[in-house]
Amino acid sequence: YLSFASDLKREISESVLCNILDALGENDIDTPISILRQLFVGIEYDLHISQEKYYQTIFYLIFTMMGLKVNTEIKTNLGRIDAVIDDKSIFIFEFKFSDLSKDNTIIPQNSLAEQALAQIKSKKYYEKYLHKGKEIYLIGAAFADRNIGDYLVEKLTSNEN
């Protein structure tokens, strides 16, 4: 029984990995985000740490274990990029963590995703990758309620270069 359960878990894991890799190969961000959300749901509430870096670390580990080239905290002349996946395309991620603001009100998730995407654009994080000749995707994502919340994806267009 244990052998069967172990084999089944391995098949599911391989299926999840293949789905993520295939999706990224087709520049589909929605599928990996959906799968990541399912993984975060499986983490018990008392294991979560209320900091952006906790979620960033899990993101890094998952994609690195899949064999993707992932870098985090990449320094540029104007700031630091939270994460970049360099595959057939370039995926630039900026994360924002939803926590209580200074006046104890919760910042809306969509506002955080918008802030994250705006930061990528205003600090021109993509400039570091323009020479690679690959499609570039900008992803602003919010972490909220112990999971990935709202996110926005934009493909870099030639007029933004």
Image (cartoon, rainbow, N blue to C red):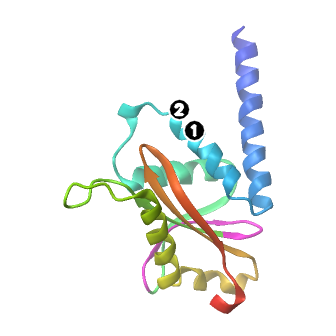
Residue 104 disc label = none
Residue 104 placed where, x, y %?
A: 21, 54
Q: Is residue 104 above or below residue 87?
A: above
Local crowd size for mark 1, using a 10 Å CA cut-off: few (<14), some (14–19), many (≥20): few
Label 2, secondary structure: give it. Answer: loop
Residue 81 at least partly seen: yes
Few, some or many residues within 10 Å of mark 2 (<14, 14–19, 20+):
few
Q: Quadrant of the C terminus?
A: bottom right
**Magenta-colored segment: predominant secondary structure:** strand
Image side of residue 99 versus residue 76, left or right: left
Q: Residue at x 37, y 55 (%)?
A: 98
Name the residue furthest top: 1
Task: Tell me the element at label 1.
Answer: helix
Q: Which quadrant would residue 151 be assigned to in this image? A: bottom right
Which quadrant of the view contains residue 146? top left
Residue 113 picture location, percent across and down: 48, 64
> Residue 145 location, x and y as percent?
41, 44
Label 1 amino acid?
Answer: Leu
Separation (CA) of disc 1 from disc 2: 5 Å
Q: Could you tell me which residue is drawn at 59 percent across and 45 percent down? A: 36
**Contact check, label 1 and label 2, Cβ < 8 Å:** yes
Question: Which residue is labeled 1 in the image?
Answer: 39
Side of 30 where 149 appears, left or right: left
Looking at the picture, which amino acid does disc 2 mark?
Gly
Residue 153 among magenta residues: no
In the displayed structure, would residue 1 be above or below residue 102?
above
Residue at 39% from the left image edge and 58% from the top image edge: 108
Which residue matches tag 2?
42
Magenta segment = 78-90
Residue 109 is left or right of residue 89, and the answer is left
